[in-house]
Image: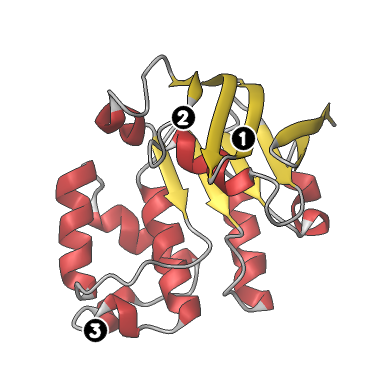
Amino acid sequence: MIEVKEAVKKFLDVNVLNRVNLKIERGDKIALMGPNGAGKTTLVRSILGFYHLDSGEIRVKGFDPIKERVKVLENISFIPQTPPPIKLNVEELLEYVSKSSKTLRGDILKESSKMDLDVLKNLKKPFFKLSGGMKQKLLIAIALAKKSDILIFDEPTANLDPKAREKFYELLSSLDENISTIFITHRLEEIEGLVNREIYMDLGSIVEDERI
């Protein structure tokens, strides 16, 4: 699903990714861990095509994240740790997502309801004015409704209350077993039952990769 070969990414002459090699197979459920500055988010952003590598290569289902980014993003749903400051209202956001990713509006509403989020009551509200929890629930609903082969979550429960976290993990436990999932997390105890592989990064390198 994802292959990273000898990936190097520098910022200010510092190797934030230091010759990273990684293969993610279909059905892998990965906890990606490590201290702040270890390179976790840079690795994910490189997979998504946000960053150009200084050397090495990345392929997502055979596609280059830079040269074939549209193809790559068709196969990935990504939930950032901090919701972006989207100025569209919720109605406009749903329309944009539906048109750009061919995700059915009804599927988004269905996934939202599973997170106890009533989207229809908030259609005219600007996304950036929603509470942190509501934003995160809507982004999770969009990601799951898209039905991607690869899900990437960057601390997805950071803005969720305990009840919403429980609902979120219930949803993930019912996902198709063939979907590959990456969790950037500091809460391993919360997702232990959802992962089958733990990867630990430090100083831009993968220092531990263990199947469990």
For the residues labelled 1 and 2, the Cα–Cα distance comes to: 9 Å
145 over 75 or under it: above or below: below
The residue shown at (46%, 59%) is 140
Earlier in the chain: of badge 3 and badge 2, it is 2
Say whether residue 3 is left or right of residue 144.
Answer: right
Q: Name the mark nearer the viewer: 3 or 2.
A: 2
Q: Amino acid at mark 2?
A: Leu
Secondary structure of the residue carrying numbered label 2: loop
Secondary structure of the residue carrying numbered label 1: strand
Asked if the residues shown at circle 1 and circle 2 are in contact, with their CB atoms under 8 angstroms apart, the answer is yes
For the residues labelled 3 and 1, the Cα–Cα distance comes to: 40 Å
Q: Which residue is mark 2?
A: 53
Q: Position of residue 134 (x, y in %)?
A: 44, 77
Q: Position of residue 124 (x, y in %)?
A: 18, 82
Q: Residues within 10 Å of mark 1 (few under 14, many from 20)?
A: many
The residue shown at (22%, 74%) is 87
Q: Quadrant of residue 180?
A: top right
Q: Position of residue 52 (x, y in %)?
A: 40, 33
Q: Which residue is mark 1?
A: 17
Q: Quadrant of the C terminus?
A: top right
Q: Which residue is mark 3?
A: 125
